[in-house]
Amino acid sequence: MNYFVINLPRDIERRDSIINEMQKCKLNFSFIEAVDGRLFSAEAIKINYNEEKSIELFNRKMTPGEIGCALSHIKIYNKIVTERLPSAVILEDDICITDCHIEKLLTDLEKIYPGDIPVVVLLNFVDRYESNKNDVMINEKYSMHDSYRSISSSAYFITQAAAKILSENIFPAYVVADKWEYFQEKFFPVKMIIPNCIGLSENSLSSTIELTGDRRKKVKLKFNYKYYLKKNIKTVIFNLLKKPFMQLKRQSDLNGKPSQTP
């Protein structure tokens, strides 16, 4: 399995922490230098970021940190496609591994999802999920379900087909890296596993390149009627035609919310 860890070389503490995590579990990996959007010139922002589309679809602007984070993930998608990797695991540098037998899980995932099937499987903690006919017992320890509105990109398995779709459709950046709900609606299934095998380290309490940003809406000066019309129509359709038939569950209801650190 190919493991790619996103990191800024200047973040020595985070770099040392993730090296220890990977070595602890004897996992080979490659660092991918993170893109720091805060250092972009106005021209670079214009080339790499589609502000108009971001506002049209989500009624908000992305922060420089969010742009850099999105571009960092896109960089790996391009690498997966160019090098024809069947699949890969993408990690941010503030994670901790809660199960050092992760290779067995990923081997099983590769069998279920070969490279030509577009899918993402979240390995970090996801609270809300949908239990339905698509539930799968991967092995004696892990089950897999449809993710529901998850917003973390700290750890996930992605196939080449999914990487290709994203590399072709989300550059210039207009959507944050962890907008899984949008990717589910637009591109391919997004799954999650129970229990999660990746947690968050103490480094997750702060972000050196403002990855999370401010998710509050940033409305244009001119009222964004198109956005609200689409949103309200979609909400009505969802509440009437889909939500009543969904079996939404919370992982935290199983045995109490799992700790994000070992």
Image (spheres, grey):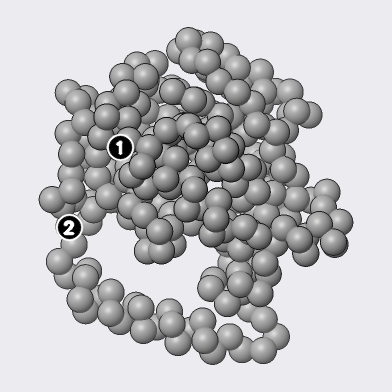
Q: Name the amino acid, label 1.
A: Tyr
How many numbered markers are drawn?
2
Q: Quadrant of residue 254?
A: top left
Query: Callout 1: helix, strand or loop?
Result: loop
Question: Residue 113 shows which numbered tag?
Answer: 1
Identify residue type, mark 2: Gln
Specify the label residue 247 is tagged with: 2
Residue at 17% in and 70% down: 244
Label 2 or label 1, whichever comes before in sequence order: 1
The image position of residue 187, as x and y in percent, is 40, 59
From the viewer's perspective, is residue 121 above or below residue 227? above
Q: Nearer the viewer, residue 251 or 109?
A: 109
Q: Quadrant of residue 207?
A: top right
Q: Using a 10 Å C-alpha cutoff, classify the residue at mark 1 as few (fewer than 14 neighbours), some (14 to 19) or many (20 or more).
A: some
Mark 2 lies on a secondary structure that is loop
Q: Position of residue 46 (x, y in %)?
A: 78, 64
- Compared to 98, does 160 lie above or below? below
* Residue sitting at x 42%, y 45%: 161
In the depicted view, which residue is nearer to us: 196 or 40? 40
Q: Which residue is at the front of the view, 50 or 252?
A: 50
Residue 94, quarter of the rendered image: top right
- On screen, residue 245 versus residue 86, left or right, reads left
Q: Quadrant of the N terminus?
A: top left
